[in-house]
Amino acid sequence: MGLTYFPNGISVSGFASPNGATFTAGDEAGNEINVVIQLLDGNGDAMATRSAVQFYLSDNANGDTLVAATTSLAIGTDGLIIEHIANSAGVLVSEADGDIDVTIGDASGAATYYIVLVMPSGELVVSDAITFAA
């Protein structure tokens, strides 16, 4: 198995590993917010294959903490979620076009969360604030 380094990503045996992501948060509805994640390859293009990345929810913009509040997580129509810590951390698996959609729930009132993806290189990619109203 060969490892090739590119300026913007890693390829293992010809498979481009995710190197980044974009996040699009929807509006809050019923104490839930859906977030669409698009995994990107080393060129900044949408991944063209199913890919997996580690993730966790943080209440810190740098991803320095794990959420302490009670939340809920559910996969939407795209992707798969495998939770290692219920409603806080695990693995996200994309569809064949690199997209994932996750619904985060919070019934505690006003709260702000961040989805933190751990890229295969170890780099953290942190979403913008996902804010719940009071």
Image (tube, rainbow, N blue to C red):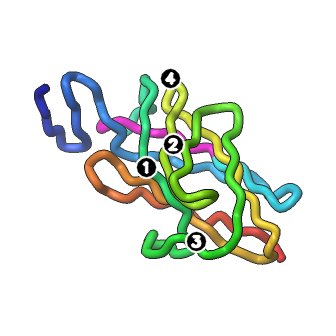
In the image, is residue 124 above or below residue 100?
below
Q: Which secondary structure, mark 2? A: strand
**Residue indicated by mark 4:** 96
Q: CA distance from mark 2 to mark 3?
A: 17 Å
- Quadrant of residue 133 in the image? bottom right
In contact (CB < 8 Å): disc 4 and disc 3: no
Classify 10 Å Cα crowding around label 1: few (below 14), some (14-19), many (20 and above): many
Residue linked to disc 2: 92
Q: Give the residue at mark 3.
A: 67
Q: Earlier in the sequence, mark 2 or mark 1?
A: 1
Q: In the rendering, at what x and y percent does residue 36 appear?
A: 62, 44
Tell me which numbered mark, 2 or 3, is placed earlier along the sequence.
3
Residue found 34% across the figure and 43% down from its top: 19
| Sequence-first disc among 1 and 4 | 1
Q: Position of residue 70 (x, y in %)?
A: 70, 69
52 vs 73: above or below? above
The numbered mark at residue 5 is none
Q: Are marks 4 and 2 in contact (CB under 8 Å)?
A: no
Please state which of the two labelled residues, at mark 1 or mark 4, is closer to the viewer: 1
Q: State how far apart marks 4 and 3 are (Cα).
A: 29 Å
> What distance separates the C-alpha of mark 3 from that of mark 1?
15 Å
User: In the figure, is residue 75 to the left or right of 66?
Assistant: right
The answer to whether residue 127 is seen in the rendering is no
Question: Can residue 122 be found in the magenta stretch?
Answer: no
Distance from the alpha carbon under mark 1 to that under mark 4: 17 Å
Q: Residues within 10 Å of mark 4 (few under 14, many from 20)?
A: some
CB atoms at circles 2 and 1 under 8 Å apart? yes
Residue 66 in picture, x, y percent from top left: 51, 71
- Which residue, given by chain and number where applicable, does mark 1 sit on? 54
